[in-house]
Image (cartoon, rainbow, N blue to C red):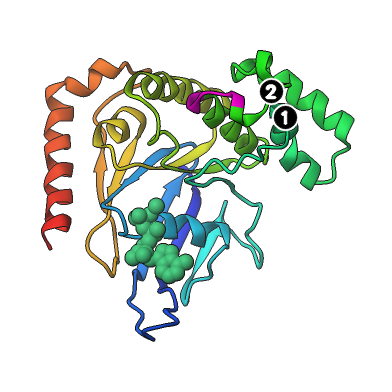
Amino acid sequence: MSKPSLQLKGVSFHYKESKSQQSFLILDSFDFDVHKGEFISIIGPSGSGKSTIFRLITGLEEPLNGEILINGKRYPNRFGKVGYMPQQDLLMPWRTILDNATLPLELKGVKKQEAHKKVSDLLGEFGLKDVEKKYPGDLSGGMRQRVSFLRTVLSGSNVLLLDEPFSALDAITRLSMQEWLLVQWEKWKTTILFITHDVDEALFLSDRVFVFTEAPVQKLVEVHVPLTRPREIRDIHSPDVIAVKEQLIDQLRKQVAT
Ligand code: ADP
Ligand code: MG
């Protein structure tokens, strides 16, 4: 197997609770490896710590113990080493779609004209060419997610962290976004970590699915998805995948019951 894109080694973490002075560990000597080019999903009940893992990987939070390696390297400052798409799309309502998309390039110091040229070429691939002069408020949810994803891709990173990117979309838009994401992923050859609470979505997209166990978490329960690629949505109804789905649902039920 190829070398890890991302490694968490012995990572422990809790948030500091200012009022109660109580703090409970979310991760306890937590180990997690993702290989280059993999599509990984993380599922678990809300509040279990999924977004926290992303906040640790990006450096928005620092672990109490342990280390985080990106492409085999330790960085004193991990911010900007991975592409991060947070749960809310965070598009700026006063900027046009083109200006929203160019933001990561501008932050890197690329001149506006050059940034516009680079992004203009990509807008077509993301199905956004006709809306580049519009504002986020004029767009459908699916389109806003695509702008947000384009912005994440433009960070230039080969590890992308996507936090429930499709959870607010209706079923049909969601399916077309999932299919679109798989095409992009195959084209860009990035490593993707994808948080969702939708088991079918995780099975359709991923090579491996990880489930949160109760806190503090040492290791996630891991399941390989028994499907080849390219995939179609109907493939998730095959007997092998249904068996895996039952396993995942049992795991999730256990968490909710505790
Ligand atoms: P998930 O993404 O799985 O829904 P989170 O990682 O957002 O869960 O949160 C895990 C736990 O940490 C929850 O109990 C949540 O209330 C708590 N938490 C999240 N962010 C903060 C924060 N900034 N300060 C204190 N506690 C937090
Ligand atoms: Mg979350």
On the question of residue 184 being in view, the answer is yes
What amino acid type is highlighted by mark number 2?
Lys
What span is in magenta?
Answer: 138-142
Of residues 213 and 139, the one drawn nearer to the viewer in this rendering: 139
Q: Is residue 215 above or below residue 188?
A: below
Judging by the rendered image, the residue that carries numbered circle 2 is 134
Q: Position of residue 2 (x, y in %)?
A: 47, 42
- Within the magenta stretch, is there residue 18? no
User: What crowding class fits label 2: few (fewer than 14 Cα within 10 Å), some (14-19), or many (20 or more)?
Assistant: some
What amino acid type is highlighted by mark number 1?
Thr
On the question of residue 10 being in view, the answer is no
Q: Position of residue 14 (x, y in %)?
A: 40, 74
Q: Judging from the image, what secondary structure is the residue with disc 2 in? A: loop
Judging by the rendered image, the residue that carries numbered circle 1 is 96
Q: Judging from the image, what secondary structure is the residue with disc 1 in? A: loop
Q: CA distance from mark 1 to mark 2?
A: 5 Å
The quarter of the picture where the N terminus appears is: top left
Q: Position of residue 96 (x, y in %)?
A: 72, 29
What label sits on residue 181 in the rendered view?
A: none
Q: Is residue 168 above or below residue 170?
A: below
Give yes or no for contact between labels 1 and 2 (Cβ–Cβ under 8 Å).
yes
User: What crowding class fits label 1: few (fewer than 14 Cα within 10 Å), some (14-19), or many (20 or more)?
Assistant: some
Q: Residue at x 51, y 23 (%)?
A: 140
Q: Residue at x 32, y 23 (%)?
A: 171
